[in-house]
Image (spheres, coloured by chain):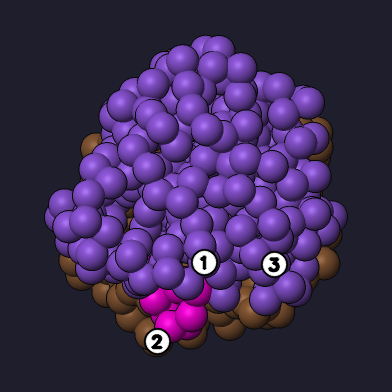
Chain colours: A purple, B brown
């Protein structure tokens, strides 16, 4: 399958590497696919040049990557997601499933980052993306766990994939992909895309637990009486 | 023990009733301890007149209730908590442990309620209360589960009590109270009072799960790899 990965940071690199290892044709989309950009050091990740040498994956501009994918991941920084997706082009996303993995975390005031009101107070990044791209079926997923867990949920026994989106068939497809490509077994369907709000709001607690335990192998599990 | 319960809604009533049943001397504090107020219908709860007839608990003004308690619960609506506690009087809270059970949920735009930026974007209600009452040891706890679960955690097997606060001795005392009075067995210490942020931010997801499952017997459990 042809898959577009919008964003070349640790999340995009990790998801793309696993999908490539599984035999898919994955293109990472970045703003400028220049030699300098490929060599630029990235937080908690390889340079894209190193990543490419290791995985054999493709790297292209945002529109070229988005246009090439049958399914598209948004793995950009949340505060830049809308701009990046607009640069990718609504036409290149139209009719497709967009798996939105991003969280609208603002690091401008240092640690801990916060959820900025315009993207979170009475909305969510997932909802804003769905509004901006009405011809795309946005599914919020994978944004509540670290990249290593996204592609290997066995690292946290009992972990659940929280999913929200307006299209039931799109959510079925994402569950299938999560199961077949990454090994996910437990899912919580939060209903329509407004369910993204709750998952993005997990970030302050999740980051606190991450820092306290000095390990990204932490998650929040829905339990019922 | 003498306990002050600030707030006469379903949370205050439920906590107070259990503590009274356990033999404690509990006073619910409300703004106006008038006959009309005691007879006023309340959401998901008895009138305070009915509650009083059933439990034998005391009802008093905010300062009288706060002044009488060796330990104080804040069980008011989150958006009114700071005003209610100011009316209770800093002097009546000074030197005491305040267990902050409230969430800053704004219902003014209907359902679902949202977390208003001034109390949540780069702070939390728990932090704002601690700032406003520096002589009081604020412990955020019990705000991530429904009132019935607060006083009977056996209703959700595996449920954890999330706690945050600047004073380790105050947190020890709250854990002891949670264990001895309500039967709590599992605790997650989130560190200082800024940990309240993450717990208050659970509300959008928790409310979604509550509505989806049509049951308040739902919680988010910290799991680690």
* Residue at image coords 69%, 42%: A1
Q: Quadrant of the C terminus of chain A?
A: bottom right
Residue B90 position in % (x across, y down): 22, 57
> Which is in the foreground here, disc 1 or disc 3?
1
Residue A131 seen from this side: no
Labels 1 and 2 positioned on one and the same chain: no
* Residue at image coords 62%, 40%: A2
Q: Residues within 10 Å of mark 3 (few under 14, many from 20)?
A: many
Residue B118 position in % (x across, y down): 24, 37
Marks 3/2: CA–CA distance: 37 Å
Labels 3 and 2 positioned on one and the same chain: no
* Mark 2 lies on residue: B169
Question: Residue B38 falls in which quadrant of the image?
Answer: top right
Marks 1/3: CA–CA distance: 21 Å
Residue B133 position in % (x across, y down): 21, 60
Q: Is residue B203 magenta?
A: no
* Residue at image coords 71%, 79%: B185
Q: Is residue B112 above or below residue B50?
A: above
SS of the residue under disc 3: helix
Q: What is the chain letter for disc 3?
A: A
Q: What is the chain letter for disc 2?
A: B
* Mark 1 lies on residue: A55
> Which dot marks residue B192?
none
SS of the residue under disc 2: helix
* Mark 3 lies on residue: A153
């Amino acid at each position: 399958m042809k898959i577009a990965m919008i964003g070349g940071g640790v999340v995009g690199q990790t998801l793309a590497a696993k999908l490539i290892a599984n035999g898919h044709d994955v293109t990472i989309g970045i703003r400028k696919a220049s030699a300098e950009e490929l060599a630029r050091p990235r937080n908690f990740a390889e340079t894209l040049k190193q990543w490419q040498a290791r995985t054999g994956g493709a790297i292209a501009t945002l529109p070229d990557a988005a246009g090439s994918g049958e399914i598209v991941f948004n793995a950009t920084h949340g505060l830049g997601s809308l701009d990046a997706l607009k640069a990718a082009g609504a036409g290149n996303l139209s009719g497709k499933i967009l798996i939105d993995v991003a969280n609208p975390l603002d690091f401008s005031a240092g640690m801990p980052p916060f959820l900025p009101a315009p993207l979170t107070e009475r909305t969510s990044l997932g909802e804003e993306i769905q509004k901006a791209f009405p011809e795309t079926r946005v599914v919020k997923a994978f944004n509540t766990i670290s990249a290593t867990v996204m592609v290997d949920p066995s690292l946290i026994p009992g972990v659940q994939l929280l999913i929200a989106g307006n299209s039931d068939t799109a959510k079925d497809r994402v569950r299938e992909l999560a199961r077949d490509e990454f090994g996910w077994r437990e899912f919580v369907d939060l209903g329509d895309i407004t369910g993204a709000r709750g998952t993005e709001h997990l970030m302050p607690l999740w980051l606190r637990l991450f820092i306290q335990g000095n390990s990204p192998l932490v998650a929040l599990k829905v339990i019922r009486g």
